Image (cartoon, grey):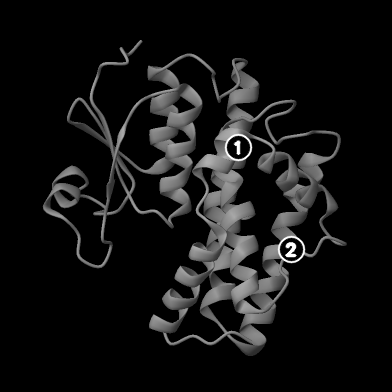
Amino acid sequence: MAERSEAVKLLGMWASPFSRRVEIALTLKGVPYEFSEQDISNKSPLLLQSNPVHKMIPVLLHNDKPISESLVILEYIDDTWQNNPILPQDPYDRAKARFWARFVDEQIYVTAMKVVGNVGEERDEAVEATRDLLKLLEKELVGKDFLGGESLGFVDVVATLVAFWLMRTEEVVGVKVVPVEMFPEIHRWVKNLLDVDVIKKCIPPEDEHLNYIKARMDSLKLKSV
């Protein structure tokens, strides 16, 4: 188990949901860390050296040893600082949590990016495909306060991507991907997240975040509809 005096540094980017989820985990654990804001358009030598394979944020440096990819980092944090566990203790429940975390990243995120990256009929198709995936997450929330059960857990930390990236992006795109009448459980879950102090502390400020998303879309020459 790590000592609090050990050096922890996060190479991240303030608007990235993948970086923010690592901040949530570190804060839940009470781990002091240094945050190093990275310019993803002009990658620093430290980032390139720390993650030579993907050359992407986030990267956690623990006593100068780099760990890359947010899901891997979350598990590393949970294994290293064992207070306030975010993964379930039961092996079956842990396996389920890993499954849903990968579902969020590999299915929901990848499909939702097509909503941002397309217009017209292609965007409409992407919206429907994203909703089909979100319906599965909606079912998982029935009867639960959080995806982790009664308290915030691994899948909740990962799925903040839905709550504070996808649901903000839809304001910029001009399409309600997650309408409350279709996804009441997800909207209830988001309200529960906002009651957690750590979440409120670690999510990007909404106005600043929306401005960033708009600027990012403009830079890609995409227009909201």
Q: Quadrant of residue 169?
A: bottom right
Residue 213 to residue 51: above or below: below
Q: At label 2, which amino acid type do we have?
A: Val
Q: Which mark is residue 38?
A: none
Q: Residue at x 49, y 64 (%)?
A: 208
Q: Which mark is residue 155?
A: 1
Crowd class of label 2 (few under 14; some 14 to 19; many from 20; radius 10 Å): many
Q: Residue 178 carries which label?
A: 2
Crowd class of label 1 (few under 14; some 14 to 19; many from 20; radius 10 Å): many
Q: Name the spot of residue 188 as percent of width and height, x first.
A: 80, 46
First reached walking from the N terminus: tag 1 or tag 2: 1
Q: Name the spot of residue 209 as percent of width and height, x first.
A: 50, 63
- What secondary structure is marked by label 2? loop
Nearer to the camera, 129 or 153:
153
Residue 128 to residue 165: above or below: below
Q: In which quarter of the image is residue 182?
A: bottom right
Q: At label 1, which amino acid type do we have?
A: Val
Q: Name the spot of residue 3 as percent of width and height, x first.
A: 30, 12
- What secondary structure is marked by label 1? helix
Q: Which residue is drawn at 48% across and 42% down?
A: 21
* Direction from residue 106 to residue 42 in the image, left or right: left
Nearer to the camera, 146 or 75:
146
